[in-house]
Image (spheres, rainbow, N blue to C red):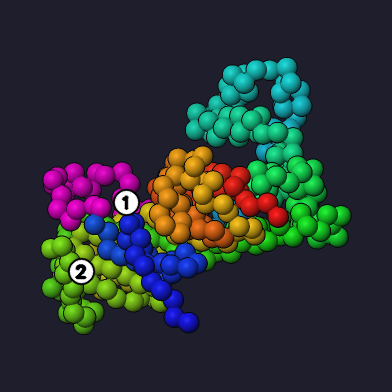
Amino acid sequence: MPKKKVRTSEGFIVDEESGEVLDDTAIDFEHPEYRAYSYEEYRRKAHYEPIQKVYGDRLCVDDEVAERIVSQIIPGLVEIIKVYLRKSLCSADRDEVYRFFSSLWGNVGAEIVRGVIEKRLSMSLPESQAYDLAGLDGLTVFRCLKNAGLDESSVVEAIKSFIEGFEPRDSYTYTLVRDLFTSIRNGKQSALIRWISKPIDNVIDMDYAVRVFSVEPKKLRNVVYLVVKIRGLGVQITSTKIDISSRYGEESIVIETIDHLSRRLGIELSKPIPMIATVIVKMPFKINLQTLSRFENASPQGNRVKIMGQGYTALVYPSTINMYINLAGTLDRIGVALAQALPTVCTYAEKK
């Protein structure tokens, strides 16, 4: 049976029954094509940097090299910190710990450590156990199933069984843990990421771009744009920015695409920045939308409920959650947004 397509108020094409996003590559009209400042001012905008500068000054240029360097540094650093913390953590207050880490890394590093300490202090013991077993995803799964009414210790045990691969005692809880973990990981791996790159010195010559790529220009709301495919990725080109749609994990292909566009168009382009992620998570149980809309700050929208959170919008269907996440330049915000949204939704799981 063909899928019945509907357009959401956010501009996405979704399947009306399942909530699956079918098309999220609509042109961005939120940011105008005109600019009220000069190009000199434009170049000073801190969030857009030349791609050559960004990668030329780095110690390493990919995650694998960074991981190898970090793995060599960490053991010795961990020993130093462990010795200090064993002697001082229980007797020192947070300001003393903060000053110690400031002396090691300066204020930025100290703020990171302070954030980690305060976050861990705010966790319950079972939450800390889930986090230690499986990181942020583990904490998300634990809080979600706890809010759905499952026993805390059973959930932690099931998470441990899933991560370590041994036979669980509680098969029902284990099945929910396994299915939710799998759904979260699949949702992140198949997430659609929208990237933005901008010209550094001059606007893009659209007439020249039309000749280079041999495509017909399109026009909507007085915006002229081209739609092309490069390295298998969908690309939309306007005079002042380039939108690229990719899957999660395709950052290197996005960078190659920007480099290719820069050479073909004869213009310097900024480092691509991840702006929006579309993530679909299938729930292992049904969600009571009526109760959800009654007790949360949510908006009923026919066969779904819309929830607005810090940096995300969640469209909740009976068994699916479609999330649109403001990445603000970092892909890590996907996990953070899921950790915020899913436990709230799981509170309204229908009991069997």
Tell me which residue sits at (42%, 50%) in the image. Answer: 300
Give the distance between the C-alpha atoms of the residues marked 2 and 1, in whole angstroms: 23 Å
Tell me which residue sits at (65%, 59%) in the image. Answer: 284
Q: Could you tell me which quadrant the C terminus lies in?
A: bottom right
The correct choice, above or below, for 37 with respect to 108 in the image is: below
211 or 238: nearer the eye?
Answer: 238
4 or 10: nearer the eye?
Answer: 4
Asked whether the viewer can see residue 75, the reply is no
Q: Position of residue 278 (x, y in %)?
A: 44, 59
Say which amino acid is labelled 2.
Answer: Tyr
Please check the rendered image and state whether residue 267 is part of the magenta-colored stretch, yes or no.
no
Residue 149, quarter of picture: top right
Circle 1 sits in a helix, a strand or a loop, which is it? Answer: loop
Q: Are marks 2 and 1 in contact (CB under 8 Å)?
A: no
200 or 339: nearer the eye?
Answer: 339
Tell me which residue sits at (41%, 47%) in the image. Answer: 299
Circle 2 sits in a helix, a strand or a loop, which is it? Answer: strand
Query: Which residue is the site of mark 2?
Result: 225
Q: Position of residue 326 (x, y in %)?
A: 41, 50
Residue 165, quarter of picture: bottom right
Give the left or right position of residue 184, taking residue 32 as reference: right
Q: Position of residue 179 (x, y in %)?
A: 68, 61
Number of marks in the image? 2
Tell me the tag on residue 49.
1
Q: N-terminal of the two: label 2 or label 1?
A: 1
Q: Which circle, 2 or 1, is nearer the viewer?
A: 2
Tell me which residue sits at (13%, 45%) in the image. Answer: 36
104 or 97: nearer the eye?
Answer: 97
Please check the rendered image and state whether residue 46 is part of the magenta-colored stretch, yes or no.
yes
Q: Badge 2: few (under 14), some or many (20 or more) residues near its Cα, within 10 Å?
A: many
Q: Which residues are magenta?
A: 30-56
